[in-house]
Image (cartoon, rainbow, N blue to C red):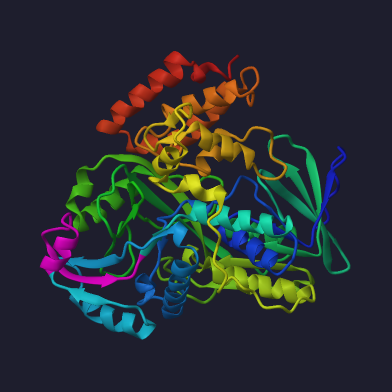
Amino acid sequence: MNTPVPETAATNLETEVLIIGGGVTGAGVMRDLALRGIHCVLIDKVDLCAGASGGNHGLLHSGARYVTTDLDAAIECRQESERLKRLAPQCIEDTGGLFVAVEGDDPGFAGRFAQLCGTAGIACDELTVAEARRLEPQLSDKLVKAYRVPDATVDPFHLALANVDHARSLNGSIYRSHTELLGFEVADGEIRAAQCRDSRSHKPLRIRARQFVNAGGAWAMKIARLAGCADVDLRYAKGTLLVHHERITRRVVNRLRPPGDGDILVPGGTVSLLGTSSTRVQDLEQVGPTVEEIDLIMREGSAMIPALAGARYTRAFSRVRPLLQGGGPASDRAASRGFALIDHRAQGLANFCTITGGKLTTFRLMAQKTADLVAARLGKREPGTTASVALPDAEAGRWTEPGAAPRHWVKLNDPSDLILCECEMVPQSAVDSIVASAPDGAAPAMSLEAISLRSRIGKGPCQGSFCGIRVASYLYDQGHFRDRAGLAALRDFFDERFKGQRLVTWGAQAAQMELAEALQCGLLGLDSLEAE
């Protein structure tokens, strides 16, 4: 698709490979290629993990969830999970997991589960009901069957940040946030350049490259269409999750039945994530949780863990899974969790490929397969090394780790380093280091949402009600915000947080929201800011 250059002169950027999509797969491709000495530019229209990569359980699958629906995907998950535990332990908590059945669940499924796990090579130990409840006292007293599997949790934000940071340090590869793809310049069977735009300043950017990688997740089909390629065929399944403000179990707890709604509880640092639902959608820009989904998730989850029925939920959120189309099952739950690498030669493009489908757990393998294709096209035959080279514990991701901020703060032993987020104990020095490591081409001051992505700011029980104001004030004092820009940044930050809170506003959370409204509207007048 030929796109005219905007009237305003575009900034030009040149690289060997342009990667479109800043999820964990795009970040993984960037690092894999950089390890091979290949310079890349990674762009995302929002920021790292803005799509499904940042809106999931954070579950590092053992593969056990897929043994009944997709054995190949189960084996891939088991292999990649074992590898990531060795190579990126700083991003992973090896919690272990349980699969539990309650009264009324199909005993036939429970009877086949261990055998299928064995076929996939997944360790699976049967526990007595008493043993399971000793490990997790919150489990239902209607428990009838339990197995232990090697599930774990992974921080996708830390993972993506560490991959990007390593790539940048290896050969100066570039990451640009808020860079929207508008179209491609195509000639003689190749893409010559991508026409982009900074979504904040609206300044045009033209990126020339030898190879182009579409790692756009749920947007991969739309990106392929911009290049004139019709061979990416996806369907979209929205998944909704709930965040409980405490860590209610020590391990991942799965329902011992075919994959369904509300059947996984994942302990993520200081909180618990419960989900997920699965709803077919068409519009990727209008995705959000519904009351019906929240009620369903709570009802199903409380069958495993009764305390979930009356728990306080601080937010709900939804993201879209890109599922591969084809001759597979009509049910999205039964659809393949495998991935596809499409080279687009049949569409007449020799330097464009798409990587889509898959799971967070298999991101490294997806990135390796993509990098193998791209490197071969560039005439570089050296094999990839991400299967053996450990991911460095990058500075960029250290503030994302739940519970880590107090340790870092205590080590600094600086009484002038004031705490800005009391829920998660994030100090001024954390904000300073995050702003200093802004993405290439970013504005002088990162947005509050970008700072939240790179730290625990806004992730605690108050959901940013207090720390949002403190961080904005601190940035203003440091000269990063001018005039009323700080208030506009606060409004945008709170608007984004409110999207996840409005549907869980009952009980204790309702009182929290009344306090937040008093601060944000009564004290700061953010509700009338746009009218001025």
Percent position of residue 414, x then y: 47, 31
Percent position of residue 265, x then y: 30, 56
Count of marks, rendered view? 0
Magenta segment, which residues? 129-151
Q: Is residue 298 left or right of residue 488?
A: left
Q: Is residue 379 left or right of residue 382?
A: right
Please identify the quarter of the rendering in which residue 96 is found: bottom left
**459 or 352: nearer the eye?**
459
The residue at the point 71 percent across, 78 percent down is: 382
Give the position of the C terminus as an image quadrant.
top right
Q: Is residue 203 magenta?
A: no
Percent position of residue 25, x then y: 58, 62
Q: Does residue 120 sit above or below 455 in this rendering?
A: below
Please identify the quarter of the rendering in which residue 252 is found: bottom left
The residue at the point 81 percent across, 64 percent down is: 210
The residue at the point 75 percent across, 72 percent down is: 347
